[in-house]
Amino acid sequence: MADIHAYPFLRHLRGAPTSYIRHTQNGRVVHEGVAQSFWFRPLSAVLSEAPVDDRELPLIFHARTSDYQDVVVQATVTYRIAEPARAAERIDFGIDPRSGQWRATPLEQLGSLLTELAQQHALELLARMQLAAALVDAPPLLRERIEAGLTADERLADIGIAVVAVRVGPIRPELDLEKALGTPARELVQQEADRATFERRALAVESERAIAENELHNQIELARREEQLIAQRGQNEQRRVEDAAAASRVEASAQADGVRLIGEAEGETERARLAAYGELPPPILLGLALKELAANLPEIERLTLAPDVLGEALAHVAGKR
């Protein structure tokens, strides 16, 4: 927008680098061009300002396909005023010489014109397409159709409007219909998710089964080894008992042999002693018997001998002499 400064009886206008300014006085063009700066008298000056930069015009409109389904089309048209002098003659770009503001709404007028023309081309194309094809194939076809139609439009050319580019966004049906169309895809995704869940559960069950089998095999192996250990312990105990029994038999045999030898020795000794005693006379045997008896009897304070025993003993002693 141009900057206008007020002075006594005069005004000064300074335009923008992207604005076309035309100053007309008494039907004669005094100043004209882009990025103008000049003095003027507000009572006699007629000023127009048209932007020459690229402008974005968002479009949203409804259309109907050949199978009577409503869709929403989103697009963006990039345009610029290529011939601002011609546009200033066809559209009211006049500005107030005091404030610099547009007296009308020229950009809204241009936007309405571009919207109607683009919508017309889009409606003609979508009316010959079914909904499924429109949702998939229509965006690039619409872009080409709208761009070609706007570029070739004579009315836009007459007012000096040039279309720079056209972008078409996704075409969307009504909300209920969009949900219905998305149901098969959601069901397919859900089925894939369920299948993945089932596979994961099956894998988990298989893993648990393998773990259980491994534990069972380990328990069986442990039981088998425990059985072997018990059997080995039994064999070792049996061997120990057998070895102890054998040692006991050897020891008993040795002791029996020792006892037998001792008994034989004692028997020989006793026989020799008895043989020696057999050669002694009875009195001496009697004396030895008394000696042996005296060794095993308690203490005797008095001993009484009969005369016949003493006499016989003395006679025997005298006979020996």
Image (cartoon, grey):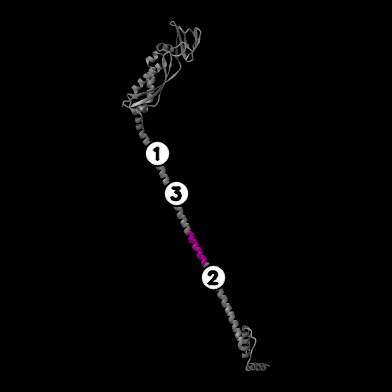
- Distance between mark 2 and mark 1 Cα atoms: 80 Å
**Quarter occupied by residue 60:** top left
Identify whether 301 is placed above or below 150.
below
Which numbered marker is on residue 193?
1
- Distance between mark 2 and mark 3 Cα atoms: 54 Å
Amino acid on which disc 1 is placed:
Ala
Spot occupied by residue 274 in the image (x, y as percentages of width and height): 60, 85
Q: Nearer the viewer, mark 2 or mark 3?
A: 3
Spot occupied by residue 56 in the image (x, y as percentages of width and height): 43, 20
Q: Is residue 86 left or right of residue 128?
A: right
**Among the two numbered marks 2 and 1 on one chain, the one whose residue lies closer to the N terminus:** 1
**Among the two numbered marks 1 and 3 on one chain, the one whose residue lies closer to the N terminus:** 1
Between 131 and 100, the one lying in front of the other is: 100
| Residue 299 colored in magenta in the image | no
Amino acid on which disc 2 is placed:
Ser
Please report the bounds of the magenta region as a residue range: 228-241
Which residue is found at the position 48% from the left and 60% from the top?
230
| Disc 1 secondary structure class | helix
The residue at which mark 2 appears reads as 248
Q: Please count the marks in the image.
A: 3
Spot occupied by residue 89 in the image (x, y as percentages of width and height): 41, 10
Amino acid on which disc 3 is placed:
Ile
Which residue is found at the position 53% from the left and 69% from the top?
246
| Disc 2 secondary structure class | helix
| Disc 3 secondary structure class | helix
The residue at which mark 3 appears reads as 211
Magenta portion: prevailing SS class: helix
The residue carrying pointer 3 sits among few (fewer than 14), some (14 to 19) or many (20 or more) residues within 10 Å by Cα, namely few
